[in-house]
Image (cartoon, rainbow, N blue to C red):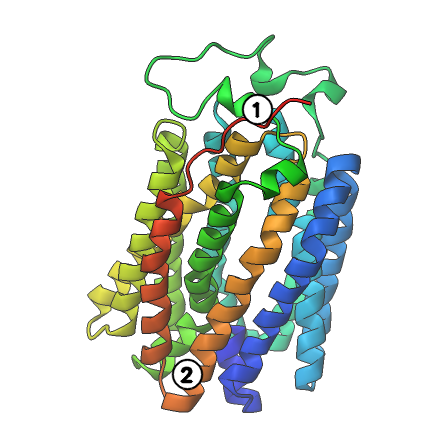
Amino acid sequence: AYVAVLSDERGWSKTALSGAAALQSVETAILGPALGWLLDRFGPRAMLQIGMLVFGCGFLLLSQIETLAGFYVSAVMMAVGMSLGGFFPLTVSLIQWFERYRARALSVMSMGLALGGVAVPAVAWSMATFGWRATAFGSGVILIVLGLPLSRVIRWRPQDQGETVDGLPEAPAQTAGSVERAPASRVEFSVRQALRTRAFWLLALGHGFALLVVTAVNVHAITHMKEGLGYTVTQAAFFIMILTFGQVGGVVLSATIGDRFEKRMLAALCMLGHMVGLLLLTYATHPAQVAAFAVLHGMAWGLRGPLMQSIRADYFGRNAIGMILGLSAVIIALGQIAGPMVAGMLADLTGNYRAGFTVLALTAGCGSLLFVFAIRPQRPMAH
């Protein structure tokens, strides 16, 4: 919503506004390995508190900007805050606490992320009623006031609290028909050993291909609906809310089937969902097609998201998972950078999003093969 409003008010190009998303992704690539190292050694609570403060201050700064450079600075601040206080440290924490039902636990956490999209219509309404500056300022205040107290409830490894993984006295026995569970999930790879596996690189590339679509939609979908399909920002925000409900449905589905079926094949199926959904949005001629995009893309995102970290923990274990996820983020960031930039640049060149969205959709479809071939690596050699 901010991209559409700032493009109209300031006259900044879509490529220029996409640059903020690219800077955020560059920050993720730079900070990811360091954050992973810090999490493996010191735990998440302090980082979450710092992250919430920085994230909120980024919104406060956004409310005061006058130049594109100021917009970029606020975007980088928000990106640093999200990295320190968001999905990554919470994921690493849950991986330490859950093994047998890891996908379910990560799915429940992802529900909060998905439900955040419900606020998009409220944000659009606030922008229309109070202006984007007041909306950004209020968002920053809410983040700081609510985020800092909530971050204090996070606990690190279960053994530090006198608890055990999954709350069980010992690892559960493998059940008939289970897929990707103990004892294989208890294999521990070092960072160096993980980097030597084909699975590490295929998973990272596949995840990056998925985010080509996800980040492009996040940055440009509302603008495309407004300029290309003729909807108002408020109407476009309604479709984003439908997308959010689809994402919630996908998260619930992930919690239900993520620990029962092979995660890499579920991820491959979701990539096809991203492709079809984005093509529906690109060439929509009726609101039903836009709604179908929202449901399909949202469900694919919600189902796939928790599996991305769960499958890495299944493959490589818990001991070095923070650093492994951090190094993966360097590769994944390439997709986060390229998605919005490709869509924005081609829109500036051609006058609409059709070419850019089509290229990204087909790329995501091809990316499904990366997950198909990302089979579990062999156990590392003991030394």
Amino acid type of disc 2?
Leu
Badge 1 or badge 2: first in the primary sequence: 1
Query: Which residue type carries mark 1?
Result: Val
Asked if residue 266 is positioned above or below residue 360 in the image, the reply reads: above
The answer to which quarter of the image holds residue 43 is top right
Q: Residues within 10 Å of mark 2 (few under 14, many from 20)?
A: some
Which residue is pictured at 39% across the width and 46% down the height? Answer: 371
Q: Nearer the viewer, residue 73 or 370?
A: 370
Residue 44, can we see it? no
User: Residue at 41% across / 84% down in the picture?
Assistant: 347
Q: Which residue is mark 2?
A: 346
Describe the element under mark 1 as helix, strand or loop.
Answer: loop
In this rendering, the answer to whether 120 lies above or below 380 is below
- Image location of residue 201, percent across then percent down: 52, 48
Closer to the eye: label 1 or 2: 1
In the rendered view, tell whether residue 245 sits above or below residue 1: above
Q: How many marks?
A: 2
Coordinates of residue 5 in the picture (x, y in percent): 51, 80
Q: Residue 134: percent from the left, percent from the top?
A: 64, 73
Tag 2 secondary structure: helix
In which quarter of the view is residue 90 placed?
top right
Q: Looking at the image, which is closer to me, 130 or 81? A: 81
Position of residue 150 relative to residue 170, above or below, is below
